[in-house]
């Protein structure tokens, strides 16, 4: 029963994630998944290193996750910044149009 509820919640989450009118920012979601993968990789490397073994991490895979995380979170942040500045400019323009000069 609990597994059925979790499965339905996951279906609902992914359905909302791919819909056009959702409240989830996809760029942030992808960035957080990439960040989580980086953290898991680094913690695993640390644990394996403490046991005296070497965990080979290919540089291009690590850099791929790093670039994915940085670009997706950077684009999401830039989108929020420009959205705020556009709203303030639109409000200023509306105020100027509604206030006739005498």
Image (cartoon, helix red, strand yellow):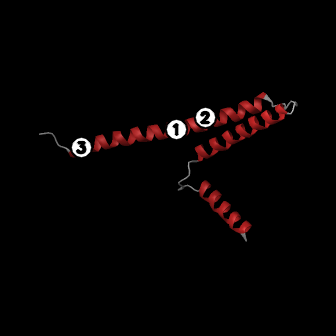
Residue 9, compared with residue 48, is above or below; it is below
Residue 12 location (% of width, % of height): 63, 62
Quadrant in the rendering for residue 67 = top right
Question: Which element carries disc 2, helix, strand or loop?
Answer: helix
Identified at 56% across, 48% down, the residue is 25
Q: Who comes first in sequence, dot 1 or dot 2?
A: 2
Q: Is residue 22 left or right of residue 81?
A: right
Count of numbered badges drawn on the protein:
3
Residue 29, compared with residue 16, is above or below; it is above
Depth check: give the residue in front, 72 or 55. 55
Depth check: give the residue in front, 101 or 17. 17
Label 3, label 2: how far apart the Cα atoms are = 38 Å
Question: Which element carries disc 1, helix, strand or loop?
Answer: helix
Q: Who comes first in sequence, dot 3 or dot 1?
A: 1
Q: Quadrant of the C terminus?
A: top left
Mark 3 or mark 2, which is nearer to you?
A: 2
Mark 3 or mark 1, which is nearer to you?
A: 1
Identified at 67% across, 44% down, the residue is 33
Depth check: give the residue in front, 6 or 25. 6
Label 1, label 2: how far apart the Cα atoms are = 10 Å
Identified at 44% across, 41% down, the residue is 83
Task: Give the labeled residue for mark 2.
Answer: 71
- Whether residues under marks 1 and 2 lie with C-beta atoms below 8 angstroms apart, the answer is no
Q: Work out which residue is located at the far bottom of the displayed protein and give it.
A: 1
Task: Give the labeled residue for mark 3.
Answer: 97
Task: Give the labeled residue for mark 1.
Answer: 77
Quadrant in the rendering for residue 89 = top left
Number of residues whose C-alpha sits closer than 10 Å to that of mark 2, classed few (under 14), some (14–19) or many (20 or more): some
């Amino acid at each position: 029963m609990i597994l059925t509820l979790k499965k339905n919640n996951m279906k609902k989450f992914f359905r909302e994630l791919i819909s056009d009118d959702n409240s989830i920012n996809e760029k942030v979601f992808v960035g957080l998944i990439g960040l989580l993968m980086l953290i898991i990789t680094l913690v695993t490397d640390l644990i394996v290193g403490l046991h005296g073994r070497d965990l080979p991490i290919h540089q291009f895979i690590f850099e791929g996750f790093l670039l994915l995380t940085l670009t997706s979170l950077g684009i999401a942040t830039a989108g929020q910044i420009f959205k705020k500045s556009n709203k303030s400019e639109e409000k200023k323009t509306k105020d100027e149009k509604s206030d006739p000069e005498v």
